[in-house]
């Protein structure tokens, strides 16, 4: 039976109170990742085995890891032995833990020398989410990252090192069956295998992505509504759709910020 997820209708039409929001509405594709049997290598999913060409080397991280990475170490020989026997990615989240307890942290890794495998995070087919905007001749999107912290001072960013691949699936005749497992990783950055249940909906920009004057008016309106006993708010019920999705309107958990793009005349695409 085909699973289905449906976003509840908004409790009111926010554009009746703030008409300037109407032209800012965008289509969003909520992906609704759910745990379950792993989809095939060529299917849309989180984690697991990706449609990776057998004749193409699996990416290895050569970017230096953050000096402030938590001081926890996994016994290398124990880890390598266990990594060879662990099953799906969602069973690999014991990194940095040995026998249920924390141990010394990994030494920061220098830049330039390959020292850890990337992991597959998200794979999307054009047939499932054409809204992603696939380049001509491509029908498969893959996001991989190194599941450790990395410092990018030019971006003021600390987190996984990411790589994106656009592919034409019909050109891959043989799949890399044994996809490497990183020796040391942050469990928070290891994806758990999920299937997607795409749903098309409409949302509006996050409150922090709106002009300041409009933000203040919405906050004032929310206070008035709350005083009358209503419990909904723009951020939680009426603005950007939450969760993993495809669309321009980010559900920010902090003030909106994107790393600078050079040249400055360009802007980031947000998915």
Image: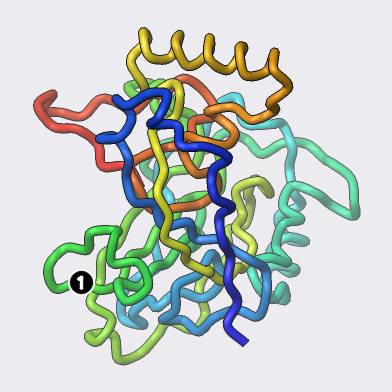
Q: Is residue 257 above or below residue 43?
A: above
Identify the image quadrant of the N terminus.
bottom right
Q: Residue at x 41, y 81 (%)?
A: 42
Q: What element carries label 1?
A: loop
The part of the image, by quadrant, that contains residue 59 is: bottom left
Picture residue at 61% right of the left edge, 54% below the top: 190
Residue 47 image point, x, y percent = 55, 66
Left or right placement of residue 121 versus residue 135 in this view: right
Residue toward you, 151 or 125: 125
Q: Taking 238 as reference, is 186 left or right? A: right
Please give left or right for residue 161 compared with residue 7 in the image: left
Instruction: From the image, tell me which residue sits under label 1.
Output: 138
Q: Which residue lies furthest to the bottom in this view?
A: 173
In this rendered view, identify the residue nearer to me: 28 or 123. 28
Q: In which quarter of the image is residue 144?
A: bottom left
Question: Does residue 15 lie above or below 101 as drawn?
Answer: above
Residue at the image point whose x is 20% and y is 71% from the top: 138
Query: 183 or 37, which is in the foreground?
Result: 37
x, y percent for residue 19: 32, 26
Please determine whether, in this image, residue 229 is positioned above or below residue 88.
above
């Amino acid at each position: 039976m085909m699973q289905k997820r449906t976003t509840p209708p908004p409790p009111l039409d926010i554009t009746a109170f703030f008409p300037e929001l109407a032209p800012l509405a965008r289509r969003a594709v909520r992906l609704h990742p759910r745990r379950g049997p792993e989809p095939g290598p060529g299917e849309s999913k989180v984690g697991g085995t990706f449609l990776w060409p057998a004749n193409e080397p699996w990416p290895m991280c050569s970017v230096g890891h953050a000096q402030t990475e938590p001081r926890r170490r996994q016994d290398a020989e124990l880890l390598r032995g266990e990594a060879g026997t662990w099953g799906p990615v969602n069973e690999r989240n014991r990194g940095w833990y040995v026998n249920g307890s924390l141990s010394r942290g990994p030494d920061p890794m220098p830049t330039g020398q390959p020292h850890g495998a990337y992991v597959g995070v998200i794979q999307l087919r054009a047939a499932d989410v054409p809204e992603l905007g696939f380049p001509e001749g491509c029908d498969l999107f893959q996001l991989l990252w190194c599941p450790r912290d990395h410092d990018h001072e030019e971006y003021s960013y600390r987190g996984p090192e990411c790589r994106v691949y656009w592919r034409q699936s019909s050109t891959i005749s043989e799949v890399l069956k044994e996809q490497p497992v990183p020796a040391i990783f942050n469990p928070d950055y290891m994806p758990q295998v999920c299937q997607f249940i795409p749903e098309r909906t409409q949302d509006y920009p996050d409150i922090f992505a709106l002009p300041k004057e409009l933000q203040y008016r919405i906050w004032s309106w929310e206070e008035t509504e709350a005083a009358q006993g209503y419990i909904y708010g723009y951020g939680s019920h009426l603005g950007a759709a939450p969760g993993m999705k495809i669309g321009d309107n980010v559900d920010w958990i902090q003030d909106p910020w994107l790393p600078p793009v050079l040249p400055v005349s360009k802007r980031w695409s947000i998915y």
